[in-house]
Image (cartoon, grey):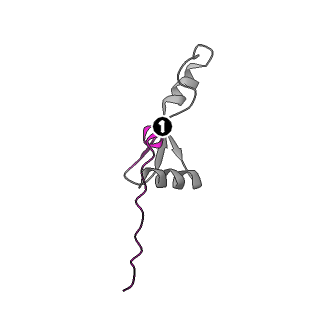
Amino acid sequence: MAKKNKRVKLKTRKSVVKRFRVTRTGKVIRRGAQNRHLKANRSKRNIRRGKVPQKVSGKTAKKIKIMLGV
């Protein structure tokens, strides 16, 4: 009898689930940094730009997808 190789199911990383989101097309989206406090010293333009979700690309995106179980 030959043994079947079972693939181990990976658990999703909950910290990654909270920080990243995958779109329908497969792009990984993250929040902008430095948008919590101490905004008085930053320009309004800079604050607005921080609110726009940003794309993650390259090997980092691949690693995040694996951690999310996608």
Judged left or right of residue 44, residue 7 is left
In the image, is residue 4 above or below residue 66? below
Q: For residue 2: magenta?
A: yes
Q: Report the quarter where the C terminus lies.
A: bottom left
The residue located at (42%, 74%) in the rendering is 5
Image position of 35 (left or right of 68) = right
Which residue corresponds to the image point at 52% horizontal and 22% vertical from the top-left? 36
| Coordinates of residue 28 in the picture (x, y in percent) | 47, 48
Q: Is residue 66 magenta?
A: no
Say which residue label 1 marks: 53
Residue reaching furthest front? 1
The quarter of the picture where the N terminus appears is bottom left
| Label tally | 1
Region of the chain picked out in magenta, as a range: 1-23
Q: Is residue 16 above or below residue 59?
A: above
Q: Which residue lies furthest to the right in this view?
A: 41
Q: Residue furthest bottom?
A: 1
Q: At x 56% / y 31%, what residue is drawn?
A: 33
Camera-side residue of 20 and 1: 1
Name the amino acid, label 1.
Pro
Q: Residues within 10 Å of mark 1 (few under 14, many from 20)?
A: few
Provide the major secondary structure of the magenta segment. loop
Which one is nearer the viewer's eye here, 23 or 49?
23
Query: In the figure, 49 relative to 2: above or below?
Result: above
Residue 26 image position (x, y, % from top left): 43, 54
x 46%, y 51%: residue: 27
Helix, strand, or loop for circle 1? loop
Q: Please state the horizontal and vertical placement of residue 6, each as a whole percent of the image.
A: 40, 70
The quarter holding residue 41 reads: top right
Residue sitting nearer the eye, 21 or 11: 11
On the image, the x and y values in percent for residue 7 come to 41, 67
